[in-house]
Image (cartoon, rainbow, N blue to C red):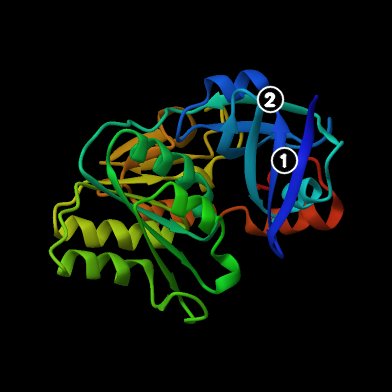
């Protein structure tokens, strides 16, 4: 079992926890994830590794409590242990010196953006991070992202923090200013990633998106994370989780994400064990 050594709520429904995982902390790379179970009867859920310390032997997870399993996870604290933890899984982000990298993190997507920003900056890139959320409460890990970036731009839908607007507004402004952008990496709600990709496609800016929100068991066995990329079927957990945003069929992905909504509500209501509640 993996012991929880630290926990903190970043907003009313978003929390971070550091978990003992010495081997994973040594082997993980930016963009990879783990699979965990809270209890023996619980489902397996995938979560991106937001940070790690190989010397101290911990990994950090940032979780939004939206379904039964993540709500159960939110009830645990320091000293408690996860039933099991496996990883690192997934293909890591390709890191190289390219020039100017724009990280676009929306809401909880800021957490998986963090290790990529760290790695890109360490590789010698100029990292501009655009952090977006509906309200100020959903702008998480700002201090971490500032440390991992050369520039940080904050936008909120309601104008409660930073500039009022969407992440695409901030990205369009950079383009209009004539900033040379060598790559955009967008992580957040599928609709956000869709419109970021539509914008960058107009300007032929290479764009990477992480489709981690659609993953279920993380091994490729269930088929629930199947997406169309460039007209071909891919499994997010084993072929990704990152793909060329200009090739992803986001409309199909969003339709698949909504398939089990009613069952998820029932699983939370009746403590169902059939494992359909994705995070």
Residue 70 place in picture, x, y as percent? 72, 49
- Circle 2 Cα neighbour tier, 10 Å, few/some/many (<14 / 14–19 / ≥20): many
Q: Is residue 209 above or below residue 108?
A: above
Residue at 28% x, 64% y is 171
The residue at which mark 1 appears reads as 275
Q: Which is more foreground, mark 1 or mark 2? A: 2
Task: Say what secondary structure mark 2 lies in.
Answer: loop
Mark 1 or mark 2: whose residue is earlier in sequence:
2
- Circle 1 Cα neighbour tier, 10 Å, few/some/many (<14 / 14–19 / ≥20): some
Q: Is residue 100 above or below residue 189?
A: above
Residue at 32% x, 31% y is 95
Front position in the image: 12 or 262 = 12
Quadrant location of residue 76?
Answer: top right
The residue at which mark 2 appears reads as 21
Q: Is residue 39 above or below residue 204?
A: above
Residue 179 place in picture, x, y as percent? 16, 60
Residue 123 place in picture, x, y as percent? 31, 33
Residue at 19% x, 52% y is 181
Query: Distance from label 1 to label 2 (Cα)?
Result: 24 Å
Task: Say what secondary structure mark 1 lies in.
Answer: loop
Mark linked to residue 27: none
Residue 161 place in picture, x, y as percent? 50, 76
Residue at 63% x, 33% y is 59
Quarter of the figure with the N terminus: top right
């Amino acid at each position: 079992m993996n012991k929880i050594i630290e926990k903190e709520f970043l907003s009313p429904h978003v929390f971070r926890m550091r978990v003992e995982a010495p081997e994973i902390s040594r082997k993980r790379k930016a963009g990879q994830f783990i699979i965990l179970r809270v209890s023996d009867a619980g489902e397996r859920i995938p979560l991106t590794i937001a940070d790690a310390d190989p010397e101290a032997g911990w990994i950090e997870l940032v979780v939004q409590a939206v379904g039964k399993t993540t709500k159960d996870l939110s009830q645990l604290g320091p000293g408690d242990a996860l039933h099991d933890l496996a990883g690192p899984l997934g293909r890591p982000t390709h890191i190289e010196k390219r020039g100017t990298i724009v990280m676009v993190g929306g809401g909880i997507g800021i957490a998986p953006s963090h290790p990529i920003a760290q790695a890109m900056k360490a590789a010698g890139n100029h990292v501009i991070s655009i952090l977006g959320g509906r309200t100020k409460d959903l702008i998480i890990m700002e201090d971490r992202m500032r440390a991992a970036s050369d520039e940080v731009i904050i936008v909120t839908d309601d104008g409660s923090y930073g500039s009022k607007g969407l992440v695409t507004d901030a990205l369009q402004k950079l383009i209009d200013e004539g900033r040379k952008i060598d790559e955009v990496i967008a992580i957040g709600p599928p609709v956000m990633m869709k419109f970021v990709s539509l914008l960058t496609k107009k300007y032929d800016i290479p764009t990477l998106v992480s489709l981690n929100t659609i993953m279920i068991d993380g091994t490729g066995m269930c088929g629930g994370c199947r997406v169309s990329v460039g007209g071909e079927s891919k499994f997010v957990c084993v072929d990704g989780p990152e793909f060329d945003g200009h090739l992803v069929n986001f409309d199909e992905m969003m339709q698949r994400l909504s398939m089990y909504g009613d069952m998820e509500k029932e699983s939370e209501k009746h403590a169902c064990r059939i494992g359909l509640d994705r995070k």
